[in-house]
Image (cartoon, rainbow, N blue to C red):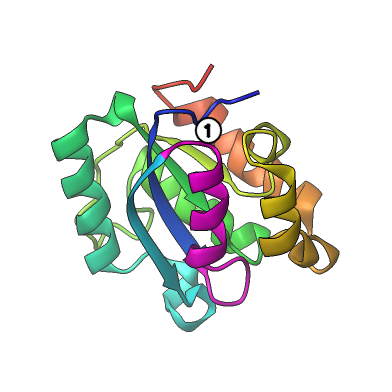
Amino acid sequence: MKMLKARKVIIIGDRDGIPGPAIEACVKSADAEVVFSTTKCFSCSLAGAMDNELQQIVKDLTAKHGAQNLVVIIGGAEAETSEVTAETIVAGDPTFVGPLAGIALGLAVYHVVEPEIKDSFVKSVYDEKCSIMEMVLDIDEIIIEVKSLRDKFCKFSLK
């Protein structure tokens, strides 16, 4: 399944989880266009929140490309930080201090380990770049948290 083919993708990797360059290699193997890629240290930030600079970048890219044309793929190390990142992207900044405070972008957001996203990648690329982290990440909990926010707030589907 090629859900990402010809899509524009924002990548938010995590230093303690799956970093941006690893996700980027996977996304490119799915014939998608990376419009922004970064690796953050969410355990270094207040409550795992997205910093103001990153919020502004996501907001600007959404204005430039249109929310319906973007997919955000995250690589958070923990369910909690993945949840906060996903919530910020779809429903607005839960801390109410950043540029996305009160702004629900409704973007499609996925964690790189979610099956429907993994199926878009060339398997050998995913195996080389990301699969090792599956041994230390709480995959089930991450998927539950990100999917629940996507199901509740996402305005745009990949399907």
Q: Position of residue 78 (x, y in %)?
A: 66, 64
> In the displayed structure, does residue 51 sit left or right of residue 6?
left
Residue type (three-letter) at the residue carrying disc 1: Arg
Q: Position of residue 106 (x, y in %)?
A: 36, 31
Q: Quadrant of residue 146?
A: top right
Q: Position of residue 130 (x, y in %)?
A: 69, 60
Q: Position of residue 6 (x, y in %)?
A: 40, 28
Q: Residue at x 48, y 77 (%)?
A: 41
- Look at the picture and state if 45 lies above or below 26: below
> In the displayed structure, does residue 65 sit left or right of residue 19?
left
Magenta span includes 20 = yes
Magenta range: 14-32
- Look at the picture and state if 123 lies above or below 42: above
Q: Residue at x 30, y 36 (%)?
A: 104
Nearer-the-camera pick, 107 or 23:
23
Q: Quadrant of residue 52?
A: bottom left
Outermost residue, top side: 159
Q: Residue at x 39, y 66 (%)?
A: 38
Q: Does residue 101 appear anywhere in the picture?
A: no
Q: Quadrant of residue 55?
A: bottom left
Q: Which residue does the numbered mark 1 point to in the structure image? A: 150
Magenta span includes 15 = yes
Question: Could you tell me which secondary element the residue under label 1 belongs to?
Answer: helix
